[in-house]
Amino acid sequence: MRRATIKREIDVALSDPQKDKEYISKLKKTKDKVRYLRIVKGYGQVEAAKLIGISDRHIRRIEKELN
């Protein structure tokens, strides 16, 4: 792997709540927001819920639908 590729992958992997909040504001569906924060960025249910502005119980319901 090239250095630039590794750096790009690390940048994506790092969680920056402010940037993540900006990005999820562009997503329309709550399911997409949950999928991005939980799967791509690795946030916990409570953290993702706070960023989206919903309850962690709602996160669990959405994840149940996704599986």
Image (spheres, helix red, strand yellow):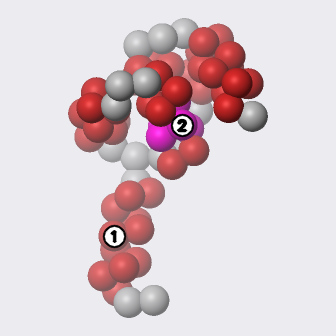
* Residue drawn at x 73%, y 24% as measured from the top left: 64
Q: Looking at the picture, which amino acid does disc 1 mark?
A: Arg
As drawn, the label of residue 8 is: 1
Q: x%, y% of residue 42? A: 55, 44
* Residue drawn at x 38%, y 58% as measured from the top left: 12
As drawn, the label of residue 64 is: none
Vertical order, 53 against 6 (above or below): above
Q: Is disc 1 in contact with disc 2, using a CB cutoff of under 8 Å?
A: no
Distance, label 1 to label 2, CA atoms, is 20 Å
Q: Closer to the observer: label 1 or label 2? A: 2
| Corner quadrant of residue 9 | bottom left
* Residue drawn at x 34%, y 86% as measured from the top left: 3
Q: Looking at the picture, which amino acid does disc 2 mark?
A: Arg
- The foreground one among 3 and 29 is 29
Does residue 47 appear anywhere in the picture? no
- The foreground one among 30 and 2 is 30
Extent of the magenta region: 34-38
Q: Quadrant of the N terminus?
A: bottom left
- Name the chief secondary structure element in magenta: helix
Q: Earlier in the sequence, mark 1 or mark 2?
A: 1
How many numbered markers are drawn?
2
- The foreground one among 35 and 8 is 35
Q: x%, y% of residue 52? A: 41, 20
* Residue drawn at x 33%, y 70% as measured from the top left: 8
Q: x%, y% of residue 25? A: 28, 27
**Is residue 58 in the magenta section?**
no
As drawn, the label of residue 35 is: 2
